[in-house]
Amino acid sequence: MTNEQQRIEDLRQQLHLYNHQYYVLNQPTVSDQEFDALLRELQELEERHPELYDPNSPTQRVGSDLSSDFQSFRHTRPMLSLANTYNKEEVREFYNRVREGLQGEDFEICCELKFDGLSISLHYEEGRLLRAVTRGDGIQGDEVTANVRTIRSIPLQLAPGSWPRNFEIRGEILMPWTSFEALNREREASEEPLFANPRNAASGTLKSKQTSVVARRKLDAYLYSLLGDELPAEGHFENLQQARTWGFKISDAMRKVRSLEEVYDFIDYWDTARRDLPVATDGIVLKVNSLRQQRALGMTAKSPRWAIAYKFQAEQQSTILREVTFQVGRTGAVTPVANMDPVQLSGTVVRRATLNNADFIERLDLHLGDRVLVEKGGEIIPKIVGIDESSLSSAERGPRVEFIHRCPECGAELVRFEGEAAWYCPNDTHCPPQIKGRIEHFVSRRAMNIETLGPETIDELYSRRLIRDIADLYDLQVDQLNGQRGERQRSAQKTIQAIADSRAVPFERVLFALGIRFVGETMAKTLARAFRSIDELSRATLDDLLQVAGIGTVIAESVIRWFQDADNFMLIERLRSHGLQFQLSEEVLSAQSDRLAGQSVVISGVFTHHSRDEYKALIEQHGGKNVGSISKKTSFVLAGDNMGPAKLEKAQKLGVRIVSEDEFLAMLKSE
Ligand code: IVH
């Protein structure tokens, strides 16, 4: 080995160690300057020695701007989720079920925090990070190794120790509150849409196509389960303690207990103490500690019998209601929004919360100046859940909150549809937020995928009168997009190109993109397959529509109404002249049949020839329906490898046929 080679090796070892001390142990032993100097030295040496490239070198933590597409990866063992409980009674039931399941044998429970991020599976070989996979649908996920390498608390190279040659470790990727707030401040300054919570921010970040973006955003990771054939110990807790010595970040909050009372103590303690944690948690996880006992207890269809989650009550705060404003959405639905004195809630400052609808306001008998209870659960938008009754005195209350009768944006008189709680602005062709909302929907990823056109640009183009409807997008020119020079010009060109490219988007997605009420992604596919072209669909009568499986009166009437509108008719003609796809492609048409008409098919297990989604699409293309769970009505189960034992048992009990992947493909081919 040359001197430089040796130096590279040494620097890598040393920097791995410093990283671990800083990001996992929170105990740096060198100054930032010293660290940076060593890192720079390593970078320079590596540049001189490209033959010594190592994806796991500490220099790779900064990421690159190259775009990476994600491959799917089939999990070695499915990534299950946990059954939820919401009170101590349910926890006791779990505890008793475990006791019965283990037939009186003693057992220990490992109590842990439930981290609120996204789960990740990390594979190590010979002590080095080999790959990182997201949960995906639990059977297969996206390989995001390059992005995960930039997360400093994930060891790329394990500390010397008795780790198994091959193992998998699973855990949660999180964005700490401080990084989350800093990120949102930055986004606010550059008028980018804010992330609603750290979980969304972490997940958006991990799916980023540029590793350098991930590197900048400062994610963190806690690991909570070790899997493999040669684990160091027989207990889950003990295995994780070992993993900590190899360099993984394992929560200090884990406790092993032997009684229900101790479980309750753990819950009570963390119910409040969690507010001081640097990362978001949404509950507690309880796991039977012994791996042997875990195996003995086994799993149900979705989750293990040996573990359960206890979810914290959503945090509530009370504050004063100052004003109610009204927001008009893409569909014209008007949502009342409470504007309140700022209040700290689950780590963020909340000033606005939804008030649901007119009935809700009436039921509460809400007045301005009332002290209201705000709650933020797992969902994105905080909501008012009631009035803080203790604050109501006989003293005078402010004016009663009245729902509006006219649209706050365009002045049209609001209408209400039978059976619906919301009021709508009926002026869908001229009401600005509805128009902008429709354009935003049209360009969104699952629709026409013109992603570079964000809400701010749409807003600006709209106010400059350059776009009034979706067809106007196709007339836009680069220079109209503020694209005079440099970066802006490049991004304007990209946008114009994306708009042009969207003309190739298949018919079913165009149909979804049009934003017809109640026509979501799946319904758009159903309609496209049933009617094959926009012209046939526009000619369909109510009866024609109702003939199609899965279409009820609400959807049918909405489709009819949309096509009756002359403006929409014109819109289609303009889009057609721009070359959008208004009929099913030959490829899809020729692949269609009604071989599976009327059949309900359950998909289970892991497949070799196609992905689960592809099988789902195949079933639909041939007239069948993919359903989630097995019942007497199930026609057959399309079973891959490792079909869940519970599903298998159920299918056998109900006499439902099991069809292998090959048999299924043969079925579609046979005449
Ligand atoms: S164990 C089979 N432990 O919660 C058990 N999960 O619904 C697998 N989570 O998808 C999970 N903290 O993303 C486990 N300490 C913890 C956890 C945890 C958070 C997440 C995980 C999982 C979900 C379960």
Image (tube, rainbow, N blue to C red):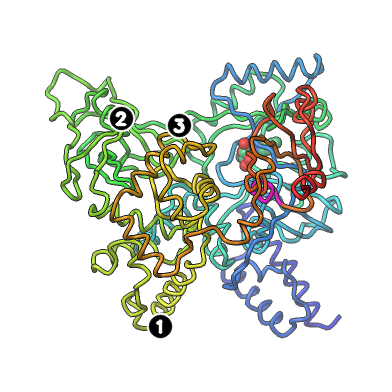
Mark 3 or mark 1, earlier in chain? 3
- Place of residue 98 in the rendered image (x, y in percent of width and height, measured from the top left): 73, 20
Q: Nearer the viewer, residue 211 or 500?
A: 500
Relative to 351, does residue 285 appear above or below in the rendering?
above
Q: Which residue is mark 2?
A: 418
Q: Amino acid at mark 1?
A: Gly
Look at the image and give the residue range highlighted in magenta: 611-617
- Place of residue 335 in the rendered image (x, y in percent of width and height, measured from the top left): 29, 40
What number is the disc on residue 486?
1
The secondary structure type at the circle numbered 2 is loop
Relative placement, left or right, of 143 versus 293 is: left
Mark 2 or mark 3, earlier in chain? 3
Mark 2 or mark 1, earlier in chain? 2
Q: Please count the marks in the image.
A: 3
Q: Nearer the viewer, residue 578 or 456?
A: 578
Q: Quick one: label 3, few (<14), some, or many (20+) residues within 10 Å?
A: some
Asked whether the residues under the numbered discs 3 and 1 touch, taking CB atoms below 8 Å apart as contact, a structural biologist would say: no
**For residue 18, which quarter of the picture?**
bottom right
Q: Is residue 173 visible?
A: yes
Q: Is residue 196 magenta?
A: no
Q: Is residue 253 visible?
A: no
